[in-house]
Image (cartoon, rainbow, N blue to C red):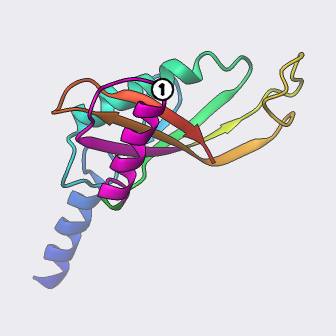
Amino acid sequence: MKRTLVACLLAVIILLPGCGVKSESGVTIDYGSSALYTKEDMDAAISLIKKEFDTWKGCELHSIRYASDEQCNAENLAWMNDLEAANDAMEQFTEVICFVSDFHSPKKNAGMTAWNEDTEYTDWQWWLARADRGEWKLMTWGY
């Protein structure tokens, strides 16, 4: 009986929807677990991250993963609101979310100086914020 229960629990954990899912673009998405955000909330944020990443010529995105609910705290929310105010924007954010990604830079930068050539970047942070369950805004990214 115990073995059957353990086997069932393991099967449920392994088959949880959205955990470590490889997208059609070959990017692994790890939604983790969140008491704050739904998969749809996260997908909306990930969409903005991918849109920005697509402008990085020659870089190859490997994975995006939800940082954790612990990162979605009052201190980081205040930081997002400070960034917004510094850009002379007036939106008052009520939610913050963080993802981390792994990607590879181009073998030759072809004039771009942002990346070390042919380098794997890991745990690259992406910070987004929104007001009252509205649209996410990509605020900052980097280490």
Q: Residue at x 20, y 26 (%)?
A: 134
Q: Residue 103: give x, y in percent of width and height.
A: 65, 37
Q: Residue at x 58, y 17 (%)?
A: 54
Q: Which residue is at the far left?
A: 1
In front of the other: 20 or 110:
110
Asked if the magenta segment contains residue 47, the reply would be: no
Q: Residue at x 20, y 50 (%)?
A: 36
Figure quadrant of residue 18: top left
Question: From this viewpoint, is residue 8 visible?
Answer: yes
In front of the other: 33 or 53:
53
| Crowding near the residue tagged with mark 1, few <14, some 14–19, many ≥20 C-alpha atoms within 10 Å | few
Q: Which residues are magenta?
A: 71-100
Q: Residue 78: give x, y in percent of width and height.
A: 35, 49
Q: Is residue 7 above or below residue 73?
A: below
Question: From this viewpoint, is residue 21 visible?
Answer: no
Instruction: Please indicate whether residue 107 sits to the left or right of residue 139 in the image.
Output: right
How many labels were placed on the picture? 1
Q: Is residue 15 above or below residue 45?
A: below
Q: Which residue is mark 1?
A: 87
The quadrant of the rendering that contains the N terminus is bottom left
* Secondary structure of the residue carrying numbered label 1: loop
Q: Residue 40: give x, y in percent of width and height.
A: 23, 31
Asked if the magenta segment contains residue 93, the reply would be: yes
In front of the other: 90 or 112:
90
- Name the amino acid type tagged 1: Asn
Q: Residue 51: give x, y in percent of width and height.
A: 49, 18
Q: Residue at x 85, y 26 (%)?
A: 113
Instruction: Please indicate whether residue 97 sits to the left or right of residue 55 in the image.
Output: left
